[in-house]
Amino acid sequence: MENILNAAPIFVINICAIMALMLAGWIISLAVKNAALADRIWGLGFVLVAWVTFIQVEYDAAKTIIIPALTTLWGLRLFIHISWRSRGKGEDPRYGAMRKKHGDSFWIISLFKVFIVQGLFMWTISFVVQYGQAARYDAAINAFDIAGMLIWAVGLFFESVADWQLARFILNPENRGKIMNRGLWKYSRHPNYFGESCIWWGMFIIVLQAPGGIATIISPLLITYTLLRVSGVTLMERTIFGDNPDYKKYVETTSSFIPWFPGKPG
């Protein structure tokens, strides 16, 4: 606990940096009339936190670049993917519904209910990124680092490949109205979300070796819970697929989250 309290000034500066980014994003969203900009800058926010933390801490070991490097690779990939996926499209239906509901007051409501809320989530989830650099621990590469990086790499593989496979599937007009059940999607209904979760569990394993590092478990727990119960699996399967009979068959044979071999219907 003492180590975490000592790092408090870093956490304060980081949340200020995050809120500055989200405020800038909100202002731009007003100009372009698209609150979905918050989703695009989500990954960039973590990259910002990683390097703002990096410049605040005095380092004496080469391994200290691991956390910001992994965060940057993940964050930039996510930013590029969401930006490419959103190109030429209008505002996300979720935000469109909010805009319709709140009418003329949406401009200010979006600041708090979209950008600031996401900023707070970003700051909390990135706790492992912040404390993983602020805490001092063994400078030599060890089993924690190797295991964490391997889990992180598995996560990046699943997330990147699953997104790529789904993008190719959607771009093919012949697949319109069909269910994506090929490639990694044959073994999990949400392999990209599984990969996202692994990313954060991998970084947690790396930081676990630090004094008080167990406290950073809040990062993978929060992102995994969010993916499973809030804005990921549950929301998507309830709102997008609904009563689609083909998807119901897919549900019967395919693991929801953790990849596994397909089962038999019923």
Image: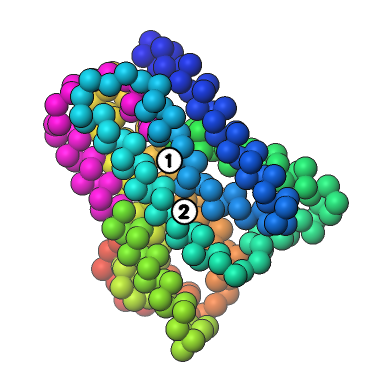
Crowding at dot 1, Cα within 10 Å, few <14 / some 14-19 / many 20+, comes out as many
Secondary structure beneath label 1: helix
Tell me, yes or no, if residue 135 can be seen here: yes
Q: Amino acid at mark 1?
A: Val
Q: Amino acid at mark 2?
A: Phe
Crowding at dot 2, Cα within 10 Å, few <14 / some 14-19 / many 20+, comes out as some
| Location of residue 257 with respect to 263 vertically, above or below | above
Give the percent coordinates (x, y) of residue 14.
50, 27
| Location of residue 187 with respect to 46 vertically, above or below | below
Q: Quadrant of the N terminus?
A: top left
- Residue at horizontal 30%, vertical 52%? 155
The residue range painted magenta reads 128-155
Residue situated in front as seen by the camera: 55 or 14: 55
Give the percent coordinates (x, y) of residue 169.
42, 78
Give the percent coordinates (x, y) of residue 227.
47, 51
Residue 104 appears left or right of 226: right
Question: Residue 154 colored magenta?
Answer: yes
Q: Using the image, tell me which numbered label, if any, was put on residue 79.
A: 2
Question: Residue 136 colored magenta?
Answer: yes
Secondary structure beneath label 2: helix
Marks 2,1: beta carbons within 8 A: yes
Label 1 belongs to which residue? 47
Residue situated in front as seen by the camera: 48 or 42: 48
Residue situated in front as seen by the camera: 204 or 8: 8
Mark toward the start of the polypeptide (2 vs 1): 1
- Residue at horizontal 80%, vertical 55%? 101
Tell me, yes or no, if residue 115 can be seen here: no
Q: Quadrant of the C terminus?
A: bottom left
- Residue at horizontal 20%, vertical 24%? 61
